[in-house]
Structures are given as structure tokens and as C-alpha cells.
Image (tube, rainbow, N blue to C red):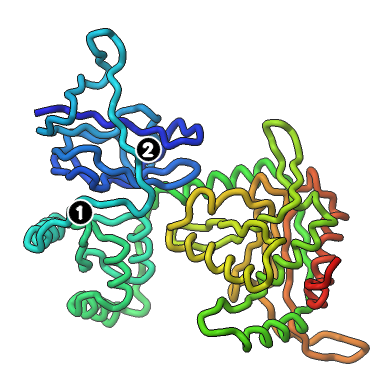
Amino acid sequence: MTRYVFKMPDLGEGTVEAEIVAWHVKVGEHVDEDQVMAEVMTEKAAVEVPAPVTGRVVSIAGGPGDMIRVGAELIVFETESAEAEPLPPAGETSRNDEPVPTPIPAPQAREPALAPAPSASAAVHVNEMVRKAGRVMASPASRRRAKEAGIDLAQVGGSGPGGRITRGDLEAALSGAVAPAAQATTATKRAAAPGLARRTGTEEVKVIGVRRVIANRMTDAKRNIPHFAYVEEVDVTELESLRQHLNGQLPKGAALLTYLPFLIAALARVLEDYPQCNAWFDTERNVVVRHRPLHAGVATQTPDGLKVPVVRHAEALALWELAEEIKRVSEIARSGKATKEDLSGSTITVTSLGKLGGIVSTPIINAPEMAIIGVNKAIDRPVVMNGAITVRRIMNLSSSFDHRFVDGYDAAAMIQALKDMLEHPATIFMAG
């Protein structure tokens, strides 16, 4: 038998450590080469790490939420493969006193190539063993989605290695493929639950993975950036009329126009006169970097938390192209297919809660940016126009600016210019 030590790989971009998000194998378990054994996360991205060899797991380092340094022992296998060189125990060196290198295969992104599927009878046997042991193998994102949908993962058949529940398995369950017995059990529980029963107990949720990254970034942004908030109401009656007219002429399958494409198109025009709002603050060099192109961040709610995919060179996209690109980047963010490049490089962020937009919000700046524009809900309200009361469609813009570098006057002037364009939407498309 050969002892094979696999160390935390260098995931690039100057990464010195990575967080364990989830283990998909356990000590004593037989693992096939290329089988996903762990999910780890850096400050940049989440990565599924495949097994480098086929063998039995001897030991693993850390649990969910633990940080493991690059080059530190991650998992140890016992293998009969002649291709794997025997390695000395951790801390020992080779005969010439130089550290023994550990072969590190390239980690794979979220859609890894899995080991060959086991036979149908073997898969059923593994799934039965997993259920009897009361252990459900699924990623944190799958668990969260199942919990929100009220699905018992123990009733979902896993088609992945070792009975792991894949995204496809969960999608099938969400579409109504859950076993009737499970549905009946859920219905029984609901019927038996008394309406005014007293609830007791607490639940502890460890802050790991994407949620930890979000929490750290939000904390840093609030701690280091003095936010200046500015709220203005915008009469979008004419914009709504134009939007409805254009949507009525759309071909089948085309992305519907929301307010966001109009807003970003108007921003592209306005920011030419307010470059300090389309900028980054480079803390290391103590330099403000003003950007000529508009790379618009679109804050998107996903099963893993809030992500900001980027619409690049929005200033060069027509209205329909903006709508399609906003739809595309939002979908890849929600599905977990967005790459690090898709989620970085924005110069100003737009955030919207859609129908939940409320009246006013206080968005947190997406550092190192200087500003963020929040879109609130558009509603019909009575207003006074030309001395008479009339009904108009009103929407608030709730924005935040980095007050170190954007003065209150400039912030207000920029929003007023944006308001003027949105209230007279023809001006968005007029040549300067």
C-alpha cells in the first residue's frame, strides 16, 4: 500500500489560504480518481477539488469554515496505484534533505468532470447505505435551496458519486419529481401542525463560504468608506409608457425591457460629466482611478447570496443589447456558472430589489467603487402638476457615494442629471 499526501493547491491570484466549504468524502471511504472530494473557497471564487488518485481516505484536515494554507496537508490517501509515489509522513524530507513535492492536479471549477458512473445496482446500494446512516451528501447551496423549497433531501435520490445529490437531482425534485411518499409525509405534517403551537429552540448557522466573503466585504466597506446617501424621486410615467410600447413589439424569446437597461444607458451618458462617480480608490497607491468606460455591476440575488456580475462597456451597447447582457450575466450568477472575471471589474454598481424595492434603501458601496445606485419600487401616486392633482408613476433612486472623494453637491448634481434623462427618455438616445 502507498501513502499519498495531497496538499492544498495554489489557486492563483496570490492566494495564500482557502476555506473548507464542504467535504464530500470521509475517513475510511473509498474514493475514485477525479471524484469531487471537497469544495473550497478563496476570496475570489469557489472551487470543487477532485481526488488526484483512487484509494481509501486515511485522514482529512479541517472542517467547514476552517482556513487551510496553500501547501498544507489537506487529505491523505492509501492507494495501491503504482503511479503514485510513496510520500513520507507530513514534516519528513527526502534523502537529500529537500522537501518532497506533492503532485497537485489542477482544481476544477463548479462543473467538474466526475468519475465514471457506477452500475445501477451499485448506485442503489450506495444510496440505501447513505439513507440508513442518516447522511445526505449535498452542497451547501443545494441544502439551502431544498430548505427554502420545503424539500426533504433524504427523500431525493442522489446520482453523484457516493450518492451525492447533484444540482440536476435537486432541479428534478423542485419540478415535482419528489416521491409521492415524501409529499404525503409533508402534507401530513402540515395538516397536523397546530396553528398556535409554541416554538422553542435555536439554530446555529456557521458563517462560511460565499456568505463569509459577503460579510467581510460589507463590513470592510462600511468601516472604511464614509457613505453619503442621497434619495430622489423620479417621475417615470413617460419611461413606463415607452417601455410598455417597446416590449409590445418584442419577438418571442427576447429579453423584456425593465427599468435597468434604460437606467444604465442613461448612466453611460451622465457619467461623462461626473467621472468621479465612475471611479475606484486604490488604497495601496492612494490614488483615485477614474474610468472612461462604464462597466456596470448588476447586484443579483442568488442561492449563495448577493453577487455582482458585470456588464462590460455598457456605453457601447444599444438598449436591446443591454437588456440581453443584463439577463445573461444575472442568469450565470444565479446558476453558479459565473467566473471570477464575470464577477469583477465593475466601475459603478446598480442594485434593485424589483417588486420588493420599497420606498427608500441605503445600499452599501461595492468597494473599491465610489458610488452605487439603488432602484426602488415604481408605484402610481397622486401628484400636483400645473396646479392640478393627477396620477403619475413615481420611483425613488436611493444612492450612496464615497464622501471622501465625491462631494455632496456633485453627488446630487449627478442624480439630478440622471433624473432628467429618465423623466424625458428620448434624451437618453439623442447624440451628445
Residue at the (83%, 74%) spot, across then down: 427
Residue 210, percent from left and from top: 46, 50
Indicate which disc, 2 or 1, sits on the residue closer to the N terminus. Answer: 2
Kind of residue sitting beneath label 1: Pro
Q: Are marks 2 and 1 in contact (CB under 8 Å)?
A: no
Kind of residue sitting beneath label 2: Asp
Quarter of the image with the N terminus in it: top left
Residue 86, percent from left and from top: 17, 23
**Badge number at residue 389:** none
Answer with the quarter of the image where residue 150 lies.
bottom left
In the figure, 67 relative to 280: above or below? above
Report helix, strand or loop for mark 1.
Answer: helix
In the figure, 80 relative to 330: above or below? above
Question: Which residue, given by chain and number where applicable, does mark 1 sit on?
Answer: 161
In the figure, 202 relative to 218: above or below? below
Along the viewing direction, whichever of 80 and 321 lies nearer the viewer: 321
Question: Which residue, given by chain and number where applicable, does mark 2 sit on?
Answer: 66
Answer with the quarter of the image where residue 124 lies.
bottom left
Answer with the quarter of the image where residue 102 lies.
top left
Query: How many C-alpha atoms fall within 10 Å of the one at disc 1: few (<14), some, or many (≥20)?
Result: many
Residue at the (74%, 42%) spot, across then down: 289
- Residue 200 visible in the snapshot: yes
* Outermost residue toward the top in this view: 96
**Cα–Cα gap, marks 2 and 1:** 24 Å
Residue 265, percent from left and from top: 72, 67
Residue at the (69%, 37%) spot, across then down: 282
Query: How many C-alpha atoms fall within 10 Å of the one at disc 2: few (<14), some, or many (≥20)?
Result: some
Report helix, strand or loop for mark 2.
Answer: loop
Residue 193, percent from left and from top: 29, 77
Quarter of the image with the C terminus in it: bottom right
- Residue 132 visible in the snapshot: no
